Image: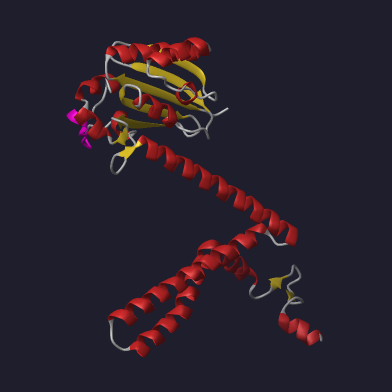
Amino acid sequence: MSQNTHTLQLFFEDPIKLKLGQLVYQYLAAGSTEQAQRWANKLGGADLDALWDAQWFNQEVFAEPSRLTLRFDTGTTDDLPLRALEALFAHGLQAAVLEVFYDQVGETERMHFDAGQWVSRQAFFQNNPQWQPVVEPKSGCGEKGKSSKDDEDADCACSKDPAKPIPITQLRKQEAERKREAQEAVEAIVDFAKAMGKSGTSPVKGLIAVLLLRAGLKGLLQAFVFTVVTVLLFKGFWLWLGLGLVLAVVLPLYYMLSEYKDLKGDDDDDDDDGDDGDADGHINNDGSNDDSGSPATVMAKG
């Protein structure tokens, strides 16, 4: 069974917060929620439901003088531990590094968090250079998070960086929205296939029709935008309006034809090649030409 393996390295503001976080997670991993809640209260009343997901399994907790490391597995469709990070940053966490190994595809991805935000690898180590030897003990990247093409290794390449810092709260909302949209898309496809099946239409043909319609609407929209812009910016109202009407016909047809060719592929070419051998009729063993199925023969018989 495929699964995702998470390694979460947590760096706290001071040793006391680190020790409290250690006790909370060690008791949570052991299944002692009563003791975990006791230390969570001392950490500032952190919510255990936010700190720990019941879907996590194979959990391990490692405490070191400079950091707390959590390791656990989840299903391939489960969420990232963003809710836990959001709660921890509200209770003494200073920075964190999340590494996820996706067993299904055999790839590793690393995300860096600083002061409650998802940041780039370079920004993380610029703000926290003391933790680079801890997080990347065998890194070939340049100092302060700057990597070069010559010495870039797995530690550098697996980093997933945002274009700009994103607060964890916002990131969590974006991930939830993305997951909801993906679920709705899957449900829509299933409903579409069921509807096509009930009507006796092939789902594949129905999907092709939808794609062609979308391509046509794309051309129509472009023609509309072109007409509006040119009428507003240039003289010659009737000229641009007429040209826009022509484009409203030509562009949808062009995009639909292009989409149809992409969907159909090279099937026509293969069919043409297969028909070449019978173009002049089939020669029988006795030397006669079997034209019984040709249009000319059929007409002659008629």
In terms of depth relative to the viewer, which is nearer, 268 or 72?
72
Tell me residue 16's x, y (percent): 30, 12
- How has the structure been colored for display? secondary structure
Q: Residue at x 37, y 76 (%)?
A: 226
Q: Which is the main secondary structure of the residues drawn in magenta?
A: loop
Is the residue 15 above or below the residue 207 in the image?
A: above
Is the residue 238 above or below the residue 95 in the image?
A: below
Tell me residue 133's x, y (percent): 24, 20
Q: Magenta stretch?
A: 143-150
Q: Magenta stretch containing residue 5, yes or no?
A: no
Give the residue furthest to the left: 143
Q: How many marks?
A: 0
In terms of depth relative to the viewer, which is nearer, 145 or 269?
145
Inspect this view and state whether residue 191 appears: yes
Is the residue 97 above or below the residue 160 in the image?
A: above
Query: Image quarter for residue 271?
Result: bottom right
Q: Magenta stretch containing residue 149, yes or no?
A: yes
In terms of depth relative to the viewer, which is nearer, 189 or 38?
38
Tell me residue 186's x, y (percent): 58, 48
Inspect this view and state whether residue 142 appears: no
Is the residue 239 above or below the residue 11 in the image?
A: below
Q: Residue at x 24, y 27 (%)?
A: 140
| Quarter in which the N terminus is drawn | top right
| Quarter in which the C terminus is drawn | bottom right
Tell me residue 101's x, y (percent): 43, 28
